[in-house]
Amino acid sequence: MNNNKQSYEELLTYVKELENKLKLYEEQFKQDEQLKKVEQALREKEEKYRLMVENTSDLLVKIDRNGIFKFVSPSYCEKFGTDETELIGKRIPCIINGDNKKADKIFENLLEPPYSSSFEHKAMTKEGERWLAWSFKAIVEEDGSVSSFVGVGRDITKNKEAEAALQSRERFYVNHAFCNILAYTQEELLGSNISSIVYKNDMEIYQKETAKRKFGEHSVYELKLIKKTGKPLHVLVSASPLMNEKGELYETMAIVVDISKLKETEEKLKEADKLKSTFLANMSHEIRNPMNGIIGFADLLRFPDLTEDQKNEYIDLITSSCNVLLRLIEDIIDISKIEAGQVIIKNSETPLNELMQNLYKQFVEKKAQVNKEHINLIVKQEIINENFTIITDPFRLQQILTNLLENAIKFTKKGSIEFGFTFSNPETLLFYVKDTGIGIPADKLQIIFDRFRQVDEESAIRKYGGAGLGLTISKSLAELLNGKMGVESELGKGTVFYFTIPYIKGKGHDIHWLKDSTYSRECDFSGKTVLIAEDEYVNFLFFQNVLKNTSTELIWAHDGYEAIEICRKNSKIDLLLLDIKMPKLSGYEVISHIRKFNKNIPIIV
């Protein structure tokens, strides 16, 4: 029994030993499996990196601290036309254009933080001389020492060639804003020489400023360029040089600003300054003349032996000079008020014929005062009502006509001056002053209404006096009366100034026109109908007044189409008075249409 027990215990011990050994085997097996997996992963990773190295176009090298090749990639061997066996274990050749000191300096820098360096250099490859860019990194061990260097290189020859091509062009880039101000496209400007768009007269400025760039100078200057349309463009140029490592100019960067509006404003300011100077010179002359007359003749009145006629003559001359001075002061005050918007229009019942007659009398005397009695002064009054009135500002209306008549007398040596008014349409009165004077050059017609401007302002010796304010004031007053002013002139033949104001009827009176001495008012056209085809209201008004007492029925057609339609619908028309020149349809065309359906109606054109 004891023997059995002992055998059992021995067997149990043996089984346990077997179990332990089995466990050890299992652990060993697991470790072996894991090791196999690690080895497989390492092999796969190594294969991956091998494929990357073999297929990359970058140049990969590993070099020890003594400059001995430890590894070179296939791409490196391919670039230089060599074999790995010819390089491994051998010292690298100089890579910086034969400059050993520069190469040594690069690798010395890799021994210290940040343990990296980048540079570019030319190298002789199997393709010839090429530009290479390198980035090197030091491998630092746990003890802080550097064991070797890993470098990645890349061929950058094409980049260098493109850069050189850009640098060789005088202009290689323009933005859209620059194209817009010159009205060119980018394609039209790129590759062209900037001198092709520089204004010819400014070429010397451009060449002088461009030369500064060779010495590294920055400059700011004004220049005129030529737009695609051929018009000049004022610009402000701020140009800076870009220099290479050798201190040579390879590019110019410029900022161009359109200053055309600024130059325009500058010219206007210069013109305004010139006008101010001219005005002040004129004022000095215009004030000094009457003041000399006042002071001079006032002193002469002190003489005790003057006759009564002499005293009266001197007093008249003093009064005349005072009036001239007063008129000048009033003009200055008026232009100031107009510009400040302080002129108040005071409309009232204005007897127009009376106003025109007063002006006529005033300027008949004025002619005598300036020794121009030989000039024929004519006033045209087509409306003969003595009590014909309109609603306007009589003072300002008379002021405008006075200014225009004074100008006419000043600039007319012989012939006539005619002034008057008429209807330009049923709602508008047209006033005019016509002379046979010296006329105005065509290029001066645009400036005569400007402040202080006169036709002979630039003459060394001004033939005619005046401050140059009369026409400016007159035009402004016409506009304040809700009208407009214009001028027509022919040099050497005369000038017509005209202006309009609204026709606002005064007290209820009929309009009576000038009598026609050749017309008998005893005619009786009772039962007769006359169609008047006329686009001008004043002409219709004339016929209406001429035929007023003949009992004629009048019909007014404003244009040709209306005349045709009236004739078509009204068979009782006895006579057609037809204007040849009308809008929409001419008189000839009207006759042609009417004769198609009415061949008997009398037509007077």
Image (cartoon, grey):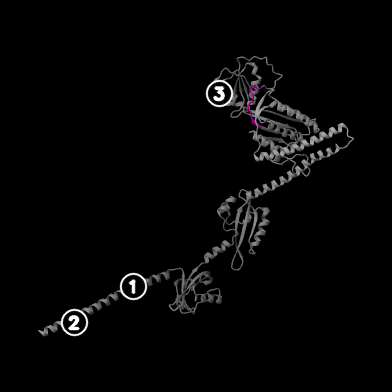
Q: Secondary structure at mark 3?
A: helix
Relative to 318, is 527 above or below?
above
- Quadrant occupied by the C terminus: top right
Relative to 392, is 112 above or below?
below
Secondary structure that dominates the magenta span: loop
Residue 450 lies in quadrant: top right
Q: Is residue 267 visible?
A: yes
Residue in view at x 67 percent, y 48 percent: 267
- Report the disc number at residue 14: 2
Left or right of 72 on screen, residue 468: right
- Report the disc number at residue 40: 1
Q: Spatial distance from mark 3 to mark 2, Cα to Cα?
A: 141 Å
Q: Is residue 506 magenta?
A: yes
Q: Position of residue 531 (x, y in %)?
A: 60, 21
Residue at mark 3 = 565
- Give the magenta part as a residue range: 500-511
Q: Is residue 388 magenta?
A: no
> Which amino acid, mark 2?
Tyr
Say whether disc 2 or disc 1 marks the residue closer to the N-terminus.
2
Q: Position of residue 257 (x, y in %)?
A: 60, 53
Q: Are the two marked residues, 3 and 2, in contact with CB atoms closer than 8 angstroms?
A: no
> Which amino acid, mark 3?
Glu
Q: Is residue 449 visible?
A: no
Q: Spatial distance from mark 2 to mark 1, Cα to Cα?
A: 38 Å
Say whether disc 3 or disc 2 marks the residue closer to the N-terminus.
2
> Which amino acid, mark 1?
Gln
Q: Are the two marked residues, 1 and 3, in contact with CB atoms closer than 8 angstroms?
A: no
